[in-house]
Image (cartoon, rainbow, N blue to C red):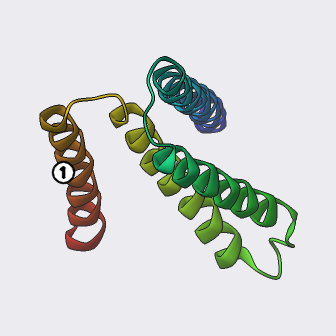
Amino acid sequence: MNQEEELANMLHAQQEMEWQKTLISICFTSGLEIALHFHQITDSKLDSLHLVCILVAIIFSCLFVSHFINPAKFPMTSKVLGKVAVFLVATVFFITISIPFPPGVKWATWIIYATSLLVIATCNFCY
């Protein structure tokens, strides 16, 4: 019975991880679509899109390196690069969705981002 529970828990964890990956990819692509659509309909500066492109390149390189380095020799490096990539994906998401917003809403978006980082830091370092 214990092995069956462990197997069920592992299956549930794997399904949850796949669900999280799906949600992240949907949010990430939606944010990029919002930003690109905004830049197509207005004559805004492209500085923010340049930043997004650089961050996407860094995300890709982090994921690429973390996937192809030997996890037996460099387990910590692989995990850190994966977490850096997830952090940058969240950052790019907040950048891209805040591009078309007026200044007040941009501030609210960045306050939500900062609060999220504060909660993560508090939960990881204090408990």
Query: Which of the 4 quarters of the picture holds residue 81?
Result: bottom right
Q: Residue at the far front: name it.
A: 43
- Answer left or right for 88 relative to 11: left
Q: Position of residue 71 (x, y in %)?
A: 80, 71
Dot 1, how many residues are within 10 Å of its Cα: few (below 14), some (14-19), or many (20+)? few
Q: Can you identify the residue that label 1 sits on?
A: 115
Residue shown at 75%/64% (left/top)?
66
Work out which quarter of the rendered image holds the N terminus and state it.
top right
In the image, is residue 31 above or below residue 93?
A: above
Q: Position of residue 55 (x, y in %)?
A: 58, 56
Residue shown at 65%/30% (left/top)?
11
Residue shown at 21%/30% (left/top)?
102
41, 59: nearer the viewer: 41
Q: Residue at the far bottom: name it.
A: 73
53, 83: nearer the viewer: 53
Query: Which of the 4 quarters of the picture holds residue 109?
Result: top left
In the image, is residue 14 above or below residue 87?
A: above
- How many numbered marks, from 0 up? 1
- Answer left or right for 64 relative to 52: right
Residue shown at 55%/30% (left/top)?
32
* SS type, badge 1: helix
- Answer left or right for 18 relative to 51: right
Work out which quarter of the rendered image holds the C terminus and state it.
bottom left
Q: Residue at the far left: name it.
A: 104
Q: Position of residue 107 (x, y in %)?
A: 16, 43
Q: Amino acid at mark 1?
A: Thr
- Answer left or right for 82 relative to 67: left
Query: Which of the 4 quarters of the picture holds residue 72?
Result: bottom right
36, 90: nearer the viewer: 36
